Amino acid sequence: MNKELMEALDLLEREKQISREVLFEAIENSLIAACKNHFGKADNIKVEINRETCDFLCYAEKEVVEEVEDPAIQISLADAKKIKSKSKLGDIVNVDINSKEFGRIAAQNARNVITQKIREEERSVVYNIYYEKERDVVTGIVQRFIGKNVSIDLGKAEALLTESERVKTENLRIGDRIKVYVLEVKNTTKGPRILVSRTHPELVKRLFEEEVTEIKDGTVEIKSIAREAGSRTKMAVWSDNPDVDAVGACVGMNGARVNAIVDELNGEKIDIINWDENQGNLIQNALSPAKIVNVFADPDEKTAKVVVPDYQLSLAIGKEGQNARLAAKLTGYKIDIKSETQAKDAYGFRIEDYMDDEDYDEEYDEEYIDDGEYEEGTEE
């Protein structure tokens, strides 16, 4: 039994997570390469390794001939009978090769073959580990800054947090432990190239999935999410279990669950609202904390007119239009927000008149549409 080789293979399998079979194949190929280096050819060289004992046999298949012209592939009848007494012309005889006879260069080449294979398999193992984590959240440590990009140590590999995927308000320092969203994992000759993000909306979603048991087991579903990284996120949640408060489950006792995520995102505000299949109700929820007088939604055009009390207009729009902008992203509607006074002047009617009209079906006349529709990415 080749005890030293067995121990080495066990260590590589345990530490590098490389299968023993791959390592056996690498050793076999290395010995064949050494034979080719030593004899000039290796087409007739065979290597067999016992997977249980790690003992190996290296031999050359040679044809029995009367006169040897190429000793690498031929053997005389007399020499063949020394190996196998019943040998005759035309037979193939297995001639043992003593690997100890290989020269220094051949041995070095064999070592290089094994080393190269181990490196390739190590890169492949790491790639597979992180490829499975693509579109998921992993924890890493800020390792170094490369210009405005950041190298994140993930343990078995490094990831790149580019400037465009960094939160501008975050002040990262070397040694900081952070959670990142894996955007993409590419396999390259130098190992896996992993791109991660701190700005992606899915980062917030995955953090809630980790923190909130009800989301993890499917009791609560995140229906939509809109985010302006570093500032505010709006998230709409829903549960088909009438006994479950979807928003309450995400907030947690005394806000424990949502606060843990806010801390991870360095104080980013998170608004959690109830999802509603009625688009008017959903838009109203999305514009919280502002109070809404009425919503006129057109599902065909994906537009909505929202009327708020005069004193709530600024709150509904939000600082620099953020509240309305996030509501538009969350719902997928172009939202036009007006105060009661503005609505009266713009549309030429009182909202109360329509609210009292039993026949009003929440649609609005095209003649009353103006140019003030609020779209995602614009400011009123």
Image (cartoon, rainbow, N blue to C red):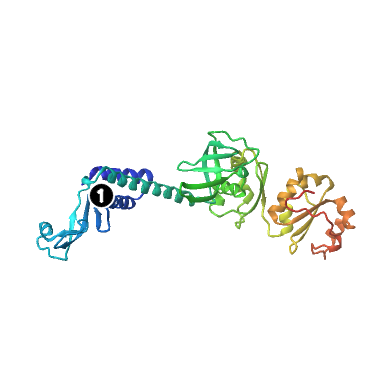
Tag count: 1
**Left or right of 19 on screen, residue 64:** left
Circle 1 SS class: helix
Q: Nearer the viewer, residue 305 or 115?
A: 115
| Spot occupied by residue 359 in the image (x, y as percentages of width and height) | 82, 66
| Spot occupied by residue 354 in the image (x, y as percentages of width and height) | 85, 60
Viewer can see residue 132: no
Under mark 1, the amino acid is: His
| Spot occupied by residue 80 in the image (x, y as percentages of width and height) | 13, 59
The residue shown at (38%, 45%) is 16
**Residue topped by disc 1:** 38
Give the residue furthest to the top. 174
Q: Nearer the viewer, residue 25 or 364?
A: 25
The residue shown at (62%, 35%) is 171
Query: 10 Å neighbourhood of mark 1: few (<14), some, or many (≥20)?
Result: some
The residue shown at (65%, 39%) is 168
Viewer can see residue 366: yes
| Spot occupied by residue 238 in the image (x, y as percentages of width and height) | 63, 55
Q: Nearer the viewer, residue 98 or 378?
A: 98
Specify the quadrant of the image occupied by residue 197. Answer: top right
**Left or right of 355 on screen, residue 73:** left
